[in-house]
Image (spheres, grey):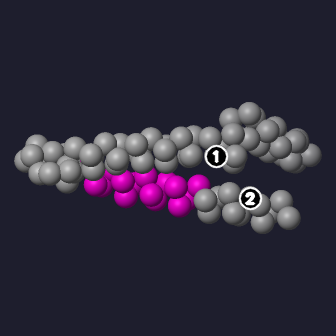
């Protein structure tokens, strides 16, 4: 069961990272539209900015990363490697 949860968490994290990359690709076009004074461009850029921050927050607070930051994963790796050390 833990393996399935980890796989789902990893998949969710990858999707969020891809979404963030896609959002970053849109910044230039939306900024240009703002500079050209196109109607609705500022609102569109602001919405993109908000979405970018939402996805960044999701990535930064992802459970998999939270456990890594807490050191739980590092401790598990050290414990696993201990019997193999000379």
In the shown orientation, is residue 61 left or right of residue 51?
Answer: right
In the shown orientation, is residue 25 left or right of residue 79?
Answer: left
Q: SS of the residue at dot 1? A: loop
In the shown orientation, is residue 67 left or right of residue 32?
Answer: right
- Residue for point 65% across, 58% down: 10
Position of 22 relative to 42 (above/below): below
- Residue stretch in magenta: 13-27
- Residue for point 11% across, 51% down: 38
User: Alpha-carbon neighbours of circle 1 within 10 Å: few (<14), some, or many (≥20)?
Assistant: some
Circle on res. 6: 2
Q: Is residue 11 visible?
A: yes
Q: Are marks 1 and 2 in contact (CB under 8 Å)?
A: no
Question: Where does the N terminus fall, quadrant-wise?
Answer: bottom right
Residue 42 in percent (x, y) is at 22, 44
* In this rendering, the label closer to the viewer, 1 or 2: 1
- The Cα–Cα distance between marks 1 and 2, rounded to whole angstroms, is 11 Å
Main secondary structure found in the magenta portion: helix
Q: Is residue 85 visible?
A: no
Q: Which residue is mark 1?
A: 62
Q: SS of the residue at dot 2? A: helix
Is 25 covered by the magenta stretch? yes
Given residues 18 and 82, the one toward you in this image is 18
Question: Where does the C terminus fall, quadrant-wise?
Answer: top right
Position of 3 relative to 75 (above/below): below
């Amino acid at each position: 069961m833990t393996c399935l949860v980890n796989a789902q968490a990893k998949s969710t994290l990858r999707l969020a990272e891809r979404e963030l990359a896609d959002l970053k690709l849109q910044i230039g076009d939306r900024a240009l539209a703002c500079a050209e004074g196109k109607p609705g461009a500022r609102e569109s850029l602001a919405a993109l900015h908000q979405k970018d921050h939402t996805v960044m927050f999701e990535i930064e607070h992802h459970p998999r990363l939270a456990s890594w930051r807490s050191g739980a994963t590092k401790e598990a790796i050290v414990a696993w490697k201990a019997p193999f050390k000379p």
